[in-house]
Image: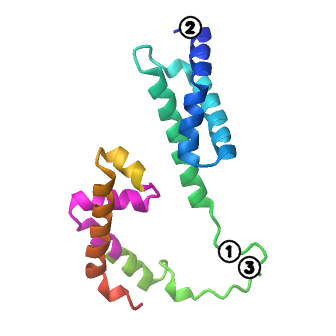
Amino acid sequence: MNALQFQKNLLSMQENMMNFALMLTTNRDDAQDLMQDTTLKVLDNQEKYVDNINFKGWVLTVMRNIFINNYHRIVRSQNLIDAGADLYNLDIPVDSSFYSPEGAYQLKEIKKAINSLNSDIKTPFVLFLDGYKYNEIAEKMGTPLGTVKSRIFFARKQLQVLLKEFRHC
């Protein structure tokens, strides 16, 4: 596909892209930003497109990946400390940190409990912990949405039993 045809195909998809962006973001301004980011990324990576691949699917996959990456970036960058707080005199109990010996032990036990789960319920639960939404997990796993929700529910229930000693910490 030549560059002109590539650009025409991309322009003809603007309505599809906007609908998909609105579905992902549920906000018109964010959807427009996502559309713009996707358009730039697709144009920058035009040489990576292979002619025998579904163009619409390729573009919407790029959009979905940008959305997920942005979501993860936002989650990682969220700051729990008030910007106006006195950073030198924060009242934070040091011993409750995962970096303390007790905290490191607790974290190790939590990871051990999660890893002991049956893979049918562990996989969607870990994806949920990684910040994916239920519908994203269902799509990624090729599993019905209700099944994903119930597996995450059962994972939580099993972890509550396995980690009952940490409930009162």
Q: Which mark is first along the chain, 1 or 2?
A: 2
* Coloring scheme used: rainbow
Task: Using residue 154 as the reference point, say whether residue 50 is left or right of it.
Answer: right
* Residue 85 % position (x, y): 76, 79
Residue 135 is one of the magenta-drawn residues: no
Q: Closest to the observer: 137 or 164?
A: 137
Q: Are marks 1 and 3 in contact (CB under 8 Å)?
A: yes
Helix or strand or loop: what does disc 2 sit on?
Answer: loop
- Please name the predominant secondary structure of the magenta segment in the image: helix
- Residue placed at 51% from the left, 28% from the top? 59
Q: Nearer the viewer, mark 3 or mark 2?
A: 2
Q: Which mark is first along the chain, 3 or 1?
A: 1
Residue annotated with mark 1: 81
Q: Quadrant of residue 78?
A: bottom right
Quadrant where the C terminus is found in the figure:
bottom left
Q: Closest to the observer: 84 or 25?
A: 25
Q: Are marks 3 and 2 in contact (CB under 8 Å)?
A: no
Q: Closest to the observer: 145 or 81?
A: 145
Helix or strand or loop: what does disc 1 sit on?
Answer: loop
Question: What is the CA distance from the residue labelled 3 to the residue labelled 2?
Answer: 56 Å
Residue span colored magenta: 110-133
Task: Using residue 134 as the reference point, say whether residue 64 is left or right of it.
Answer: right
- Residue placed at 69% from the left, 45% from the top? 29
Question: What is the CA distance from the residue labelled 2 to the residue labelled 1?
Answer: 51 Å
Residue annotated with mark 2: 2
The disc at residue 87 is 3
